[in-house]
Image: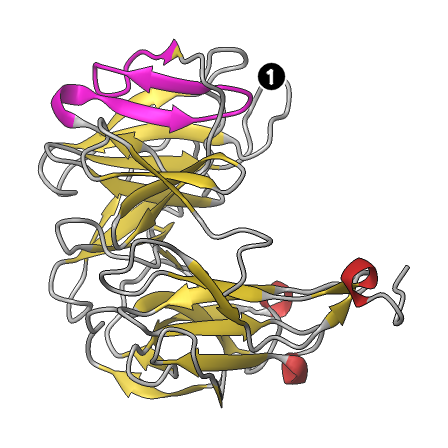
Amino acid sequence: MSDPAAPESGFCRQHVAVRDAGAKEWVLRRSPLPRTSGTDGISSQLVPLGPGRALVEDGGAEPGDARSWFTRDGGRSWRETDRRTAGTTPEIPAGAVLTTGCAAPAGALPDACERERLVVVSPQDGRRRALARVPLLGAHPRPQEQPEPDGSWWVSGTDPLSGRAAVAVSRDGGRSWTAGRLPSPASGPGWYTVVAVGQDAVYAAEMGELAAGEPVKNPMRALHRSLDGGGTWQRMWTTGPTAEPRSLLGVPVPGPGGRVGIGAEPSGYESVDGGRTFVRLGDGSRHTRRTPLGLLRESSSCRYELTADGVRWSEFRLACEGQVP
């Protein structure tokens, strides 16, 4: 229960963790989000858009309640921006984020959106603009927000002819796309597919409900591999009723020489043969995501790890409660 007389126990104050270029430590700076009581819900996200640039978005309960703020000076100042998609852009510029917006009906919340379109969040002003050329992947394409290390952008969805899981890649900043169907074990589409590009292979994890066995969170139906940059795919792992891994937290972690890691529940797994077989790891499950600096995972509270090659991880401590500037 909120207590106006004791804000520290009844209110939630938001901050943004920032590490300036050349700085040795993370610092906490003011967030533009309004102060909320401990009993109020909040749905917000931080969208990095390049050095010193970021967007903070507050989803709101209704379409008209959504708000966003943009900074170009590392969180020292914030300017409110319009969250509506306006105009088009021919490409995805450096530092931008690729996401989706509702194309029909206009202004609908995600659960009520009948058709989505690819949208670019600009690093120049934080505004959203529709991407001019898009791959044909059904009514609900799912883009990966960040480019892979080789500069490629990936979007998953469904093949318009067969209805099966498919992915598309752009190697020219979204100006053109090449789509391909995955050798899925299911006849219908799954939830979505996540892609991770390694030094010598591309991995695509097909997510969706499993046909047999006990239900699991974040179920992974299959793991596919491409040795030619996504031109052709081979299904390496098909999830069964009991064989692990049966789930995936975030994205696969590709390494050299056929190594690939899977953060699953309740433990992590690793393969040295491209995903044909896996062994269980003893360090538990971790969620991994792509960032501009590499693959990022949380090792413990306030401690994170980054890798560029899927083998060597460097740990750092993020600014936490009590570390105010």
- Relative image position of residue 240 (x, y in whole percent): 48, 16
Seen from the viewer's position, the closer of residues 250 and 233 is 250
Per the image, the residue denoted by label 1 is 213
Is 115 displayed left or right of 204 in the figure? right
Q: Is residue 260 magenta?
A: yes
User: What residue is drawn where x is 52% and y is 77%?
Assistant: 104
Seen from the viewer's position, the closer of residues 195 and 48 is 48
Seen from the viewer's position, the closer of residues 122 and 51 is 51
The colour scheme used here is secondary structure
How many other residues sit within 10 Å of disc 1, few (<14), some (14-19) or many (≥20)? Answer: few
Q: Is residue 263 magenta?
A: yes
Q: Quadrant of the N terminus?
A: bottom right
- Residue 123 picture quarter: bottom left
Q: Is residue 157 above or below residue 230?
A: below
Is 113 displayed left or right of 28 in the figure? right
- Relative image position of residue 84 (x, y in whole percent): 49, 85
Is residue 39 in view from this perspective? no
Q: Is residue 56 above or below residue 81?
A: above
User: What residue is drawn where x is 55% and y is 72%?
Assistant: 31
Q: Is residue 241 above or below residue 19?
A: above
Residue that sits furthest to the front in the current view: 325
Is 189 displayed left or right of 172 in the figure? right
- Relative image position of residue 35 (x, y in whole percent): 70, 74
Task: Label 1, secondary structure: give it.
Answer: loop
User: What residue is drawn where x is 31% and y is 78%?
Assistant: 122
- Relative image position of residue 273 (x, y in whole percent): 21, 14
Q: Is residue 128 above or below residue 277?
A: below
The amino acid type of the residue labelled 1 equals Gly
Is 10 displayed left or right of 264 in the figure? right
The residue stretch that appears in magenta? 256-279
